[in-house]
Structure formats: C-alpha cells, structure tokens
Image: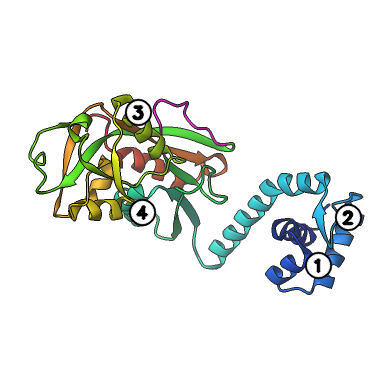
Amino acid sequence: MLDIHRLRVFRSVVASGSVQGAATHLGYTPSAVSQHINQLQRETGLTLFEKAGRGISPTPTGRLLAQQSDDAMGALARLDNVVTDLRQGRTGSLSIACFSSAGEEWVPRLVAKLQREFKNVLITVDLNEHTEAARAECDLDIRTEDLSEKPSHIKGYTRHELTTEPYVVVLPAKHPLADRDEIAMTDLADDPWVDDSNQDQTCGRILRRAIDKSGMSPRTVAECQDHHTSFALVAAGIGVTLAPLLTLGSLPRKARAVPLSSPEIRRGISVHVRDAAAGSPVTRRALELLHEIAPDDER
C-alpha cells in the first residue's frame, strides 16, 4: 500500500515544479523532500522524475500517478472533514459552489432554511465563476448554462435542472427609453455600452451570440468584471447593458431594468450534486429547497 504522506510530498513536488518549491510549501528541508521521493520510487518501483537542466521534472509515469491520485486525495480530504466535524460535535457538512448572483439571492435563503433544520451542519460557500470544473470538495455546484449548447456533465456528479431566466436591458433612470414596457436590442444601437461579460464564460457566450444575431456592433465604452460595477456605471450615465434577471437584486436606485423583447435571451441554471454526497439528508434537503427557491421559467 502506498504511503499517503509520501504521496502528498510527491504531489507537492509535481505542483510546485521543484523540490525547493515543495520544501518551502510543506515547511521541510529540500533533503527531506528528496528522501520522501526516493522512498516512494523504491516503494512503487517507478521512475517518477527525471533531470531537467539543474532541476527535475515528472516523467510521463509521474504525471499519470499525480493525475490518478486526485480522487484518492480528495476522498482523504473529505474523510479529514468528517473527523473534524465529529470532533467539534457537528453531524456533517455541506459545501456549495455557485455563481455570484445565485450566491447573493438564493444561497442565503437556502442556508438559513438548512440551518433551522440541521442545527449542527457546517455549510461552506465558494464561487465557481472562474473555473469550468467543479471544486474539489463541492457537494452542490450551481451553474449557469447556455441553452444552445449541450448540458454540461461533470464526472462524479448528477445534473438537475433548476430554471431558465431572461435577460433584461439595464439603463440609466433618466434614459429616454427607461419608461418603456419593453425594448428591442436594436433600439440601443446608438447607445454606449457597458460590458461585464467574459467571452470564456457562459454568460459571455450567450450575449455574444445574441449581439451577433441582432446584427449590431455595440460601441463599448467601459468594461468590467462583475454586474455590481456594471450597474454602478450604468447608474452614473456611462452607458447601457444587458443582465440576467437574478442580478437585479443589486440594481442601484438611479438605474432601471426593462424587459428585452427582441431577441429574447435566456440562460439556464442547473445544480450538479456530487454522487458521493447525494445520500446525505442535508444534501437531499438542499436539493429540494433549491427547486423551491429557484423561480420557474415563466417569471
């Protein structure tokens, strides 16, 4: 059986790219790290590293071992969490990854209800907007989806659809179109635009496709990374933007949201449940509550 401690040291060397880097990270001497690596190579009968200039780099075998050990190390980390929970008198834990507007609007209501029903459960929340992979210890991963693409599937997780929601036009309160019942995207062809979308993320792809479909070439005057900043710029009269309905909880007083009539733009929202956690009572209840909290697709 592999020595778990040596395996951790080995993975640290692979991640750090050097013995010195791993030693610094782990608080060991470089000599101690080298000894662990040599012992692991003898233990496995594998050549895990080779010389590369003045340092070393993992062999193909070493890279494969590091990759294949991810699940095992994740399971050990979860077991450590269980031990910590039991030691501190908690009956369990639930980890949630979500995008920011779900974290603002849905997750506080979800956590409040769960903590009323499960007094000793530790709940952790993290953002998932900057990665396409589920976070290592995430039990529930709440995601946005492009409805024109195939639904995403994550190994070790089961996907559940929650809802779809429309995009709206967000413009300054004194804009000439602010009092309309609905606005077509082409009505905004001559307006300056504020862009908070990342083309590599789901919402960015949705918006780019809608803009291309409209035939417009918006004049972007400001770019930012989040809807809070985008809304603040709109409220200051800098320009107009498009935003999903769920983000409007943070809409400033000096901005208005008007339904977008043409083209209609929607995004999907789903939750991926880690299979290993699906049998937990708190996970099952969280999934039920998310279906209750999420608005239906007619909103």
Label 2: element kind: helix
Mark 4 packing: few (<14 Cα in 10 Å), some, or many (20+)? Answer: many
Identity of the residue drawn at 47% across and 33% down: 159
Mark 3 packing: few (<14 Cα in 10 Å), some, or many (20+)? Answer: few
Reading the image, the residue beneath label 3 is 212
Against 172, residue 120 (above or below) is below
Q: Nearer the viewer, residue 204 or 137?
A: 204
Say which label, 2 or 3, has the lower sequence index. 2
Magenta span dominant secondary structure: loop
Q: CA distance from mark 2 to mark 4?
A: 46 Å
Residue 262: image x %, image y %? Answer: 22, 26
Reading the image, the residue beneath label 4 is 111
Image: magenta residue range: 144-154
Give the number of the disc on residue 41: 2
Give the number of the disc on residue 102: none
Identified by mark 2, the residue type is Gln
Residue 19: image x %, image y %? Answer: 78, 65
Identified by mark 4, the residue type is Val
CB atoms of marks 1 and 2 within 8 Å: no
Q: CA distance from mark 1 to mark 4?
A: 42 Å
Identity of the residue drawn at 77% across and 57% down: 7
Reading the image, the residue beneath label 1 is 33
